[in-house]
Amino acid sequence: METTLHRNSRFQKYNMQVTLARDIKWGLIGGIAGTLVMELVLMGALAAVGMPALTCLSFIGDTVAQLWADFGIHLAGGVPMCLAAQYLIGALFGVIFGTMLSKVSALHINSLKKGVLLAVIYAEIISQPLLAMTTILLKMTAKDTLLWYSASLMMHFLYGVVLGVIISCGLRCRLSPSAAYR
C-alpha cells in the first residue's frame, strides 16, 4: 500500500512539473506571437492613416531609455530599444500567464472563450503600469495621453486575444493518458 502511494505521489509531482512546463511553453509562444501581431497591426494602422509606421515604437523605446537614464544608465532609445523591451516583456507576460493558469485551479482553461477572456483581462490589467510610465516619463499632454491609452487599449486587447487563442489551443491539445506511455 505504501509503495503504491509513494509511486502515485511521485507520479503526481512529475505530472505537475510537466503541466507547469507545458503551460509556460504555451504562454511563451502566445506572448511572443501576441507581441508580433500587436506590432504588425499597429504599424499597419499608423501607415494607413499617413503617419510613420514606427512612431509608436519610437515612443516606447524612448520611454525605456528614459527609465534607465533615471537610474544613471544611458542607452539609446528608439525602435531597437522598443523591440528588445517589447519582446522581452511580451514573452515574460506570456510566461507569467501560463504559470498562473497552471498554479491557480480556478483559472484552468476548458474553452477557447474562457482562455481569450482571461488573457484579454490579464493583458489589459498588467499593461497599465507600463502605459502610465510612458505618459509620465515622456511628459505627455492630456490629449496625447488620451490618444496613447485609446490606442494601447486596442493593441493590448489584440495581444490578449492572440495569447488566449494560442494558450487555449495549446493546453487543449493534450495527449490522452494511454497515448502518453507509447
Image (cartoon, rainbow, N blue to C red):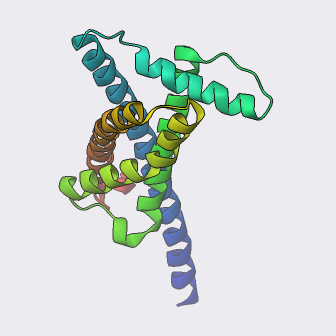
Q: Is residue 77 or residue 18 the one in the foreground?
A: 77
> Residue 85, position in %: x, y?
56, 29
Side of 153 where 131 appears, left or right: right
> Residue 10, position in %: x, y?
56, 71
Q: How many marks?
A: 0
> Residue 16, position in %: x, y?
49, 64
Q: Residue at x 41, y 13 (%)?
A: 54
Side of 29 where 111 appears, left or right: left
Q: Residue at x 32, y 61 (%)?
A: 177
* Most distant residue in the front direction: 142
* Most distant residue in the right direction: 72
* Most distant residue in the bottom direction: 1
Residue 84 in sight from this viewpoint? no
The quarter of the picture where residue 7 lies is bottom right
Q: Residue at x 42, y 22 (%)?
A: 56
> Residue 80, position in %: x, y?
56, 15
Q: Is residue 15 or residue 80 the one in the foreground?
A: 80
Side of 104 where 179 appears, left or right: left
